[in-house]
């Protein structure tokens, strides 16, 4: 929704402005890594977590047209699963409002009614059933901050809404989101009704969690109470917050957006920032969290970003975007794919519009994403080990180590060929190249073509 775009822009402006005025001493790297202090490091192996190996795929239902949408998504689930995804996130599936509306799916008229253009209850049941049979979880978008102007709460529960100085229901303060009415969480009855509405989708359809839109706009104590109540009944519920405030973890969320790291990463690929700034942001976002219970969502695009600027417009080429995706995927967190990323569109795509996209139109791009995520899902155990992240000459070196396994990820983040000195502990060792498993002896130095990446394992 419009608030998401504004929030993203605010974070990006903050990071870009700080980068512009910062020193660029880290812009020019040497061609070796021996003298570089790792930017990020996890000191010891941690026990396995349910969050290990998660790969999320954000489904925009409107990319499947405006008829029989649930059925089309269900038919597409095997292809989505083949990308090595484990969680399907459905953007809002509830009935959208009409009064003062601008076409946003985040303008909800009824929290427990389906958008009739998507299909009926039986269609959604079949979608969730099929996803579960394929071994995937299904989470849905939840918009708790506001409703449409024609939601029946407007007339039945006027006191559940924020009022202006004249006592009139108003849109969220400090915004231009005129298509929605702001909810007032001072009302205990509203809080109860919202939790009941969230329970409905779990009990009726068996959904596995929520992506909570504009989570920072809703009081933390509501989230804490709501999540505790939901997880008491469904302990494995997955909760993703669209927000970056670490206090949302304390409220019970499992995943937060990696807004800061994305901003630094995009700035670097646009020549406005440094790798050191990106890696430091990753460290800052995760240094105080419990990795068994809490992670950041990592991405190079999503519905808000793609609506403003095509991924290729941000990263300048499909190859650059893939290298950025490898970096964000392996550096830490839970990777996200957005529907359309597998076809690398060259223009922005509004998420307000109904359209039909051929998501199989770019098989080479799809295959490369599949290979990246195959390597990621094959290395779940070793990535619970100690981690170091280093960089030199535009090449990032990510290593993981346990008592029985080691992993090395090399990413050339530049548009030029780079000579990369292999870490001494890896040079001239027999390794497996992932995801295909082919074996080779690593040289002490290797040439990486522009935006090339490699993943190697020793076991």
Image: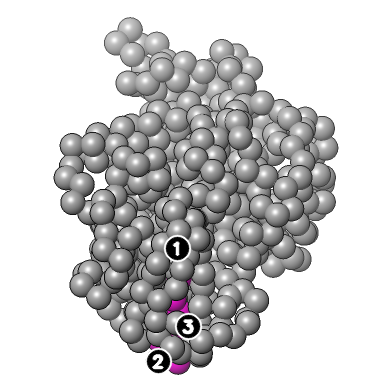
Label 1, label 3: how far apart the Cα atoms are: 15 Å
Q: Is 207 placed left or right of 269 in the picture?
A: right
Identified at 28% across, 71% down, the residue is 33
Q: CA distance from mark 2 to mark 1?
A: 25 Å
Q: Residue 353, percent across and down?
A: 66, 26
User: Residue 411 got which mark?
Assistant: 1
Q: Which residue is mark 2?
A: 403
Foreground: disc 3 or disc 2? 3
For disc 3, the neighbor class at 10 Å (few under 14, some 14 to 19, many from 20) is some
Cβ atoms under marks 3 and 2 closer than 8 Å: no
Task: Tell me the crowding category of disc 1: few under 14, some 14 to 19, or many 20 or more residues within 10 angstroms, Cα based.
Answer: many
Q: Secondary structure at mark 1?
A: strand
Q: Pick the residue in front: 378 or 268.
A: 268
Q: Which residues are magenta?
A: 402-409
Instruction: Tell me: residue 335, above or below residue 6.
Output: below
Label 2: how many residues lie within 10 Å, few (<14), some (14-19) or many (20+)?
few
Query: Which of the 4 image quarters holds residue 72?
Result: top right
Where residue 321 appears, x then y in whole percent?
52, 49
**Residue 232: image x %, image y %?**
49, 63
Apparent side of residue 161 relative to residue 457 in the rendered image (left or right) = left
What residue is pinned by disc 3? 442
Q: Is residue 95 magenta?
A: no
């Amino acid at each position: 929704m419009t608030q998401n775009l504004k929030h993203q822009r605010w974070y990006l402006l903050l990071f870009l402005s700080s980068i512009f005025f910062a020193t660029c001493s880290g812009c020019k790297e040497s061609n070796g890594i021996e003298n570089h202090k790792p930017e990020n490091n996890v000191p010891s192996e941690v026990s396995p977590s349910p969050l290990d190996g998660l790969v999320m795929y954000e489904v925009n239902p409107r990319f499947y047209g405006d008829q029989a949408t649930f059925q089309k998504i269900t038919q597409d689930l095997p292809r989505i699963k083949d990308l090595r995804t484990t969680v399907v996130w459905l953007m809002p599936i509830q009935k959208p409002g009409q009064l003062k509306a601008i076409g946003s799916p985040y303008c909800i008229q009824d929290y427990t009614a389906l958008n009739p253009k998507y299909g009926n209850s039986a269609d959604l049941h079949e979608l969730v059933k099929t996803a579960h049979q394929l071994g995937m979880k299904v989470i849905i978008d939840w918009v708790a901050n506001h409703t449409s102007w024609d939601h029946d709460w407007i007339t039945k529960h006027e006191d559940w809404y924020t009022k202006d100085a004249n006592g009139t229901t108003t849109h969220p303060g400090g915004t231009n989101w005129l298509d929605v009415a702001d909810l007032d969480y001072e009302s205990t009855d509203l809080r109860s009704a919202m939790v009941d509405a969230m329970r409905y989708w779990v009990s009726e359809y068996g959904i596995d969690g929520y992506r909570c839109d504009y989570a920072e706009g809703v009081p933390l104590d509501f989230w804490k109470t709501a999540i505790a109540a939901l997880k008491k009944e469904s302990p494995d519920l997955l909760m993703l917050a669209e927000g970056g405030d670490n206090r949302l973890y304390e409220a019970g969320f499992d995943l937060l957006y990696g807004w800061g790291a994305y901003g630094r990463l995009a700035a670097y690929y646009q020549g406005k920032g440094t790798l050191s700034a990106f890696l430091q942001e990753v460290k800052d976002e995760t240094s105080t969290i419990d990795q068994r219970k809490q992670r950041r969502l990592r991405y190079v695009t999503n519905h808000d970003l793609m609506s403003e600027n095509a991924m290729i417009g941000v990263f300048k080429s499909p190859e650059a975007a893939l290298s950025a995706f490898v970096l964000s995927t392996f550096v830490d967190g839970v990777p996200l794919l957005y529907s359309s990323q597998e076809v690398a569109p060259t223009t922005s795509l509004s998420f307000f519009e109904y359209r039909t996209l051929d998501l199989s139109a770019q098989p080479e791009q799809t295959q490369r994403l599949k290979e990246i995520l195959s390597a990621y899902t094959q290395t779940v155990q070793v990535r619970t080990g100690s981690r170091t992240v280093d960089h030199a000459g535009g090449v990032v070196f990510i290593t993981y180590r346990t008592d029985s396994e080691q992993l090395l990820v090399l990413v050339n983040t530049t548009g030029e060929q780079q000579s990369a000195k292999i870490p001494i502990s890896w040079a001239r060792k027999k390794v497996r190249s992932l995801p295909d498993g082919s074996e080779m002896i690593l040289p002490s130095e290797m040439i990486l073509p522009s935006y090339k990446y490699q993943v190697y394992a020793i076991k």
